Amino acid sequence: MSDQKSSPSDAVRDCGSVVPLGAYALPGRVPDPKPGIEQAVEAERLGLNTLWLSERWGTKDFGVLAGAFGQVTSRVNIAAGVTHFQSRHPAMLASMAMTAQALTDGRIVLGVGRSVDAMWDAVGLPRATNQSIVDSADIFRRLCRGEKVKYDGPAGWFPSLRLNDVPDVPVPPLVFAALGPKGLTLAGKHFDGVLLHPFLTPEAVRRSAATVRAAASEAGRNPADVRIYATVVVASGLEPEEEAAVVGGRAVTYYQIPGFGEQLARVNEWDPAALDVLRSHPHLVGLKGAADSVRTRDQLVEASSALPPEWITGAAALGSPAACHETFARYREAGADELVLHGSTPDQLGSVVDGLAMANK
């Protein structure tokens, strides 16, 4: 990860107890990607370390937006949070990443995830397995280094792969999105970093970071070389109803998913019985897919009242900038190398980030 550029801002410099900050552009569902350009400009102005994009098919293609973000910024890292190995042919993924890496002078971070089997079944692509993920990472790195790849295995059949031209830039770091112990172990053994899920408490981040670093050590790697990105939903300086929409409504979209909500509860060591109460809410009864694809924001906010308060307040940064800074410090102390601020876009984070800079002068 040493090839990534660091921020000059006191607000995000990795010094003392201050944790570097990143943020998402275009969080959630968006009908128009153009606002992401101004969000990228603001991320650069604030001195954020990394600008993340949660890729969704339709308006949030990472390759296109990485190119656009790269041309209106000169310092901030640009990260996929996340894309998937299956969604592009290996040569296309490596080509996209290296082209963007060349255009941005080495500021690309490629976050990848597993997603769920039902999604891959629905679109006719192979399910991800641990071995296919590991092999895909190796294929990606080899292609980015200009090597010829011949492969037949869990990741697919590729008789002869090679990029025609490879720019003189570092291979983009690979970050794995993980939640449970198997994914965290995979990240520690085979990836340059791990992207932790939103709505983890600081203690859950501490346990997750320990799992990642133990796996790295077991694999003969330097645990410090695996960067821990902790995602923290942030709402500061908002009216109560807007705070509820940013935090509570977003929490519902994760907790209501059968199986996934249980996994989040286990990681946080919470009683999963609370999920039955949430899913019995009139807006969620019988819902099996993603809630934000079929419910309005107001409906999600209403449903969030069924969640235990600590499931929101104990795993997000809320309130005044000073209160958010205290939360950031707890995540840093828990082992996070960088915080990925979610829910609020860079243009909504000025008071939080600028206040952190002032507090550390």
Image (cartoon, rainbow, N blue to C red):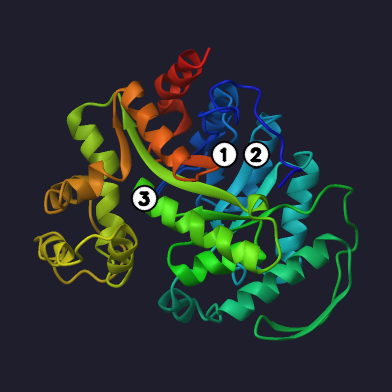
Of residues 348 and 180, the one nearer the viewer is 180
**Residue carrying label 2:** 77
Residue 81 in the figure: left or right of residue 322: right
Q: Dot 2: few (<14), some (14–19), or many (≥20) neighbours within 10 Å?
A: many
Of residues 264 and 248, the one nearer the viewer is 264
**Residue carrying label 3:** 203
Q: Dot 3: few (<14), some (14–19), or many (≥20) neighbours within 10 Å?
A: some
Say which amino acid is labelled 2: Asn
Q: Visible in this render: residue 114? A: no
Mark 2 vs mark 1, CA separation in Å: 6 Å
Q: Mark 3 against mark 1, which lies toward the viewer?
A: 3
Mark 2 vs mark 3, CA separation in Å: 27 Å
Task: State yes or no: discs 3 and 1 in contact (Cβ < 8 Å).
Answer: no
Mark 3 vs mark 1, CA separation in Å: 25 Å
Of residues 266 and 67, the one nearer the viewer is 266
Does label 3 or label 1 sit earlier along the sequence? 1
**Residue carrying label 1:** 51
Residue 215 picture location, percent across and down? 58, 66
Residue 117 picture location, percent across and down? 44, 78
Q: Disc 1 on helix, strand or loop?
A: strand
**Residue at screen point 69% across, 76% down:** 135
Task: State yes or no: discs 2 and 1 in contact (Cβ < 8 Å).
Answer: yes
Does label 2 or label 3 sit earlier along the sequence? 2
Q: Disc 3 on helix, strand or loop?
A: helix
